[in-house]
Image: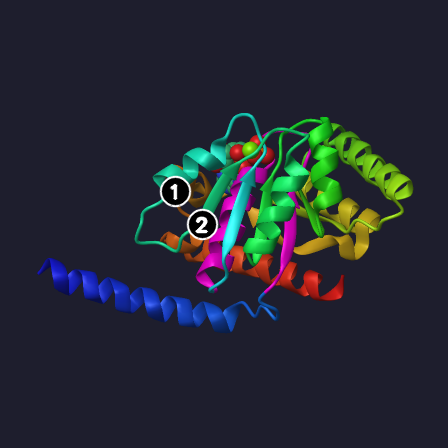
Amino acid sequence: MFYVYKYVYLYVHTLQCMYLYTQIFIPNSKIMVISLISYKGGVGKTTLSENIAVCFAHAGRSVCIVDADDSANTVSWAKKRPDSLPKIEVIRENNKEEIAFKIKELNEKYDLVIVDSPPSQVPISDMIVLMSNLVIVPLLPKGEQETNTINQFVRKVRSLEITKEKKIPVYFVVNEYDGRISLHKNFAESMSKTFGKRLLPSKLHNRVAYAEVTHEGKGVLEYNDNKAKEEIKGLVNDIVRTIKQI
Ligand SMILES: Nc1ncnc2c1ncn2[C@@H]1O[C@H](COP(=O)(O)OP(=O)(O)O)[C@@H](O)[C@H]1O
Ligand SMILES: [Mg+2]
């Protein structure tokens, strides 16, 4: 009986992967370095790193996450990840002198390197920004305090761009959004006015699934919440579209 279940599971899993290939179209096998950065904690850097990695892994890409946060949440996540799911390597590197070498080395080995960053303005964050082909900043739909942190980060990126004479593509995504709350709606509208196309169209809603899967070493793509699955696929498609433009 066990074997029957196992083969049915594998069959369903293969079908799901084939379906994902049609849902997430990723043009080149070599992708790049995507970092999740914010000077604030609790905005979703780790949640998004894990969930984006899971989507790319299911779409057949080799993926590695660099966990640059001292709290090493992604390292713990990887330890819980079931062997039956697509493999995602997680490497801890929180040394600012070493991170550039590590990212370069991993970028040559994997299709995609995702960097999960620490929650403050520390020198390692600047190194991560400079090593990224795409920076994604998760935003919580809150008031002025959130906008101050965003402005601080945007200014830092500008100063790095000037000093290094390099364009750094920074995009934003609203996390834990609830369209019924006017503060959230106003926040999203204001961010859209400020950042235009640099605000990704997908928004992630506040869902139990995100909090649950992180304790199981999984992504919402591997969990039974279809709305969460659809929105993470939407976000990954936004990212893929963005990669093609930059
Ligand atoms: N969209 C979401 N819905 C529900 N819970 C979320 C969502 N995004 C993040 N969380 C939860 O919020 C907490 C902080 O998220 P996390 O990704 O660890 O933030 P960060 O890495 O920026 O500090 C975690 O407990 C996570 O499970
Ligand atoms: Mg984190």
> Which residue is labeled 1 in the image?
217
Q: Depth check: give the residue in front, 110 or 18.
A: 110
* Crowd rating for badge 2 (residues with CA inside 10 Å; few <14, some 14–19, many 20+): some
Q: Which SS class for mark 1?
A: loop
Q: Residue at x 72, y 32 (%)?
A: 146
Q: Where is residue 192 in the image (x, y as percent from the top left)?
A: 77, 51
> Which residue is labeled 2 in the image?
88
Q: How far apart are marks 1 and 2 (CA)?
A: 10 Å
The reply to whether residue 83 is visible in this rendering is yes
Q: Which residue is drawn at 72% across and 36% down?
A: 127
The reply to whether residue 186 is visible in this rendering is no
Q: Which of marks 1 and 2 is in front?
A: 2
Residue 80 is covered by the magenta coloring: no
Residue type at tag 2: Ile
* Crowd rating for badge 1 (residues with CA inside 10 Å; few <14, some 14–19, many 20+): many
Q: Which segment did they paint magenta?
A: 30-59
